Image (cartoon, helix red, strand yellow):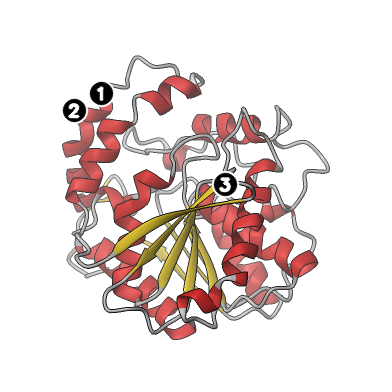
C-alpha cells in the first residue's frame, strides 16, 4: 500500500469513501433481520448491480453455462479473448455459505479470465440452511472433477482452485479433500480473505466499526446455517471448516490474503503460518486498512489495485 494512504479508524480512506457511496443501497436492507436469510437473498440484487457497474469491464470475455451431474449443478465457463494459452482457474464464490450465486460474480470471474489468460470455471453450489454441510463441498468437488476431466476441451493442462470469503474457505476445503481422496493434480490454491474457522463467532472490539460488512453476528448465522447449529462444537470436519484440519502438509502452492480490518484476520494469518510450517509454498499478504470485500467495494483505489495485481501475478506464475 502506498505510504501516503490515509487510515481513518484503522480503515483505508478510499475504502471508507466507497462504503459510504454504497450506503444508500445498504440502508434499503436495514430493516431486514440478519437471520432472515431468504429476505437477504431476495433483496441483494440492487447492491450486486451497484457494485458490478463500478467494477472493471472485461471486454472480449465470453461465458457459457454447463449443467452437470444429471443437470443438477450449474457451472459457468469464462473464456478470454484471444483463446486462452494458460490453465483453468476453478472459482468458488463467496456469500457466507448462505448468500450469493454465480450470476453476481460475472464481473469478477470475467476479470480473472481477462487478466490471467486462463479459462475460469465458476460453480453454483447449493446454499445453507436449505442444504447444510456437506452439500456445498460436495458440489465443489463434483465441479472440480468435471473441470479436470474436461481440461483438454479448454486446451489446458493445469488447474488451480480459488475463491473469496466463504468461497475461499470452500476452496481450501476442496484442496484438502482432493489431497485426501481424489488426488487430482492442483497447481495452486488462491484463498482471498477466506472463511476458515467455525469457532470465530465472538465479538472483537478491533472490528467494531459500523462499516464492517461481514460481522461476527453474520459469521455465526452463516456457520450455524451450514453446520445445523453446531458451529464451534467438537468434531467439526475439516472439509467444513479447514482451520480444523490436523495437517496442512501436501497442499498445493498457496496464495492467501486478508485485511487488517477483516474479522477473518486472525484465522487467515494462523492458516498461512500453519501452511508455511508444514512446508507448503505460500505467498501471504495482510492489506493494511482493508475491510472484508474491500477489493470489490472499492476496486479502483490503490490498495485494491495492488491486491488484484498480486493475485493475478500469482495465478499467472502457476497456471
Q: Nearer the viewer, mark 3 or mark 2?
A: 3
**If you read the primary sequence from the N terminus, does the residue marked by circle 3 or circle 2 appear first?**
2
Q: Is residue 103 left or right of residue 183?
A: left
Q: Which mark is residue 27?
A: 1
Q: Which mark is residue 24?
A: 2
Q: Is residue 34 visible?
A: no
User: x%, y% of residue 301?
Assistant: 19, 59
**Picture coordinates of residue 269, whole percent (x, y):** 55, 61
Given contact means CB atoms under 8 Å apart, are the residues at marks 3 and 2 in contact? no
Q: Residue at x 63, y 45 (%)?
A: 136
- Residue drawn at x 22%, y 29% is 25
The answer to whether residue 103 is above or below residue 210 is below
Dot 2: few (<14), some (14–19), or many (≥20) neighbours within 10 Å?
few
Viewer-proximal residue among 14 and 28: 28
Specify whether 90 is left or right of 275. Answer: left
Which quarter shows the N terminus? bottom left
Residue 277, numbered label: none
Where disc 1 sits, the SS reads helix
| Contact between labelled residues 2 and 1, with CB atoms less than 8 Å apart | yes
State whether residue 18 is above or below residue 208.
below
Q: Which residue is mark 3?
A: 73
Amino acid at each position: 500500500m502506498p505510504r501516503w494512504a490515509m487510515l481513518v479508524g484503522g480503515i483505508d480512506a478510499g475504502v471508507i469513501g466507497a462504503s459510504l457511496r454504497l450506503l444508500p443501497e445498504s440502508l434499503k436492507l436495514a430493516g431486514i433481520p440478519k437471520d432472515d436469510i431468504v429476505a437477504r437473498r431476495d433483496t441483494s440484487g440492487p447492491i450486486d448491480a451497484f457494485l458490478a457497474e463500478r467494477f472493471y469491464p472485461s471486454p472480449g470475455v465470453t461465458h457459457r453455462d454447463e449443467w452437470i451431474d444429471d443437470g443438477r449443478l450449474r457451472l459457468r465457463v469464462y473464456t478470454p479473448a484471444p483463446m486462452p494459452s494458460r490453465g483453468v482457474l476453478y472459482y468458488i464464490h463467496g456469500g457466507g455459505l448462505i448468500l450469493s450465486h454465480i450470476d453476481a460474480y460475472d464481473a469478477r470471474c470475467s476479470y480473472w479470465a481477462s487478466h490471467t489468460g486462463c479459462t475460469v470455471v465458476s460453480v453454483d453450489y447449493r446454499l445453507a440452511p436449505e442444504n447444510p454441510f456437506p452439500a456445498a463441498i460436495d458440489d465443489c468437488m463434483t465441479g472440480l472433477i468435471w473441470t479436470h476431466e474436461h481440461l483438454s476441451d479448454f486446451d489446458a493442462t493445469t488447474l488451480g482452485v480459488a475463491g473469496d470469503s466463504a468461497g475461499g474457505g470452500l476452496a481450501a476445503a476442496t484442496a484438502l479433500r482432493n489431497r485426501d481422496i481424489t488426488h487430482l493434480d492442483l497447481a495452486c490454491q488462491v484463498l482471498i480473505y477466506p472463511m476458515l474457522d467455525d469457532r470465530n463467532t465472538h465479538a472483537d472490539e478491533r472490528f467494531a466499526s459500523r462499516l464492517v460488512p461481514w460481522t461476527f453476528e453474520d459469521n455465526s448465522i452463516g456457520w450455524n446455517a451450514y453446520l445445523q447449529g453446531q458451529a464451534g462444537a467438537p468434531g467439526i470436519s475439516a472439509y467444513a471448516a479447514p482451520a480444523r484440519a490436523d495437517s496442512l502438509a501436501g497442499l498445493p502452492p498457496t496464495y492467501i490474503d486478508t485485511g487488517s480490518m477483516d474479522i477473518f484476520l486472525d484465522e487467515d494469518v494462523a492458516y498461512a503460518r500453519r501452511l508455511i510450517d508444514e512446508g507448503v509454498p505460500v505467498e501471504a499478504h495482510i492489506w493494511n486498512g482493508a475491510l472484508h470485500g474491500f477489493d470489490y467495494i472499492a476496486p479502483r483505489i490503490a490498495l485494491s489495485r495492488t491486491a488484484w495485481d498480486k493475485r493475478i501475478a500469482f495465478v499467472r506464475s502457476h497456471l
